[in-house]
Amino acid sequence: MTTLTESVQTTAPPTTFQDRVVAATPGDPRLEMCIQCGTCGGSCPSGPDMQHTPRQIFAMIRADMESEVLASNTPWYCVSCYFCMVRCPQEIHIPDIMYTLKGMAIKAEMYGERVAPDLADSFVGYVENYGRSFEFGLATRHYLRHQPLKLLGKAQMGLGMLTKDRLELTPTKIKQIEQLRAILQRAKAIEEAVS
């Protein structure tokens, strides 16, 4: 049985910004089902740093505010915790939509501030060098580059995590890092061939 979204995608080319976002998002993102309840924004741990809540982004998508959406920092601050999706009464695939918006912003070269790309570059650098993310280094580098005074406010949380053995002060490299690097190089080659 096909869903309404699938039949729309197969019968007519996407014309509105919402149609293009839905068509570019894998699976059925259910974006058109948003009832603007705000549960996603209230659930988001990155909400205070976002220019717009996911609810606002979805309203802007519906209003065809493409340039404003793609310039927003919201998709870049999504940490893919999926808490918003778990709590969404409409089961909207919010993180998947955020990934789509990031890709669209990159293609259009329309991301606003340099914060999000710097954060993404730092994350990728840690994965390439160590095979995993290094949260302490990632957070420290981010705050030192973009919000150094906020770093002081995070010290108490960091100390609490450190005393409970939830924070590593130095990165650790995975075994067989060369195999991961070969996979990443192959993925980059495929990406360049497709682009």
Image (spheres, grey):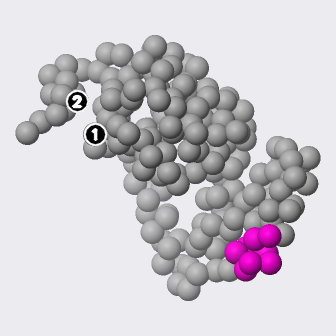
* Labels 2 and 1: the sequence-earlier one: 2
The quadrant in which the N terminus is found is top left
Residue at 61%, 29% (x, y): give it.
52
> Is residue 25 at all visible to an observer of this figure?
no
Q: Is residue 173 above or below residue 120?
A: below
Q: Which residues are magenta?
A: 160-168
- The reply to whether dot 2 and dot 1 touch (C-beta < 8 Å) is yes
Q: Is label 1 in a helix, a strand or a loop?
A: loop
Q: In x, y percent, where is residue 113? A: 72, 33
Q: Is residue 148 above or below residue 156?
A: above
Q: In x, y percent, where is residue 63? A: 46, 13
Q: Is residue 18 left or right of residue 120?
A: left
Residue at 86%, 62% (x, y): give it.
156
Amino acid, disc 2: Thr
Residue at 22%, 30% (x, y): give it.
5
The residue identified by callout 2 is 5
Q: In x, y percent, where is residue 14? A: 29, 21
The single residue placed furthest to the left in the displayed view is 1
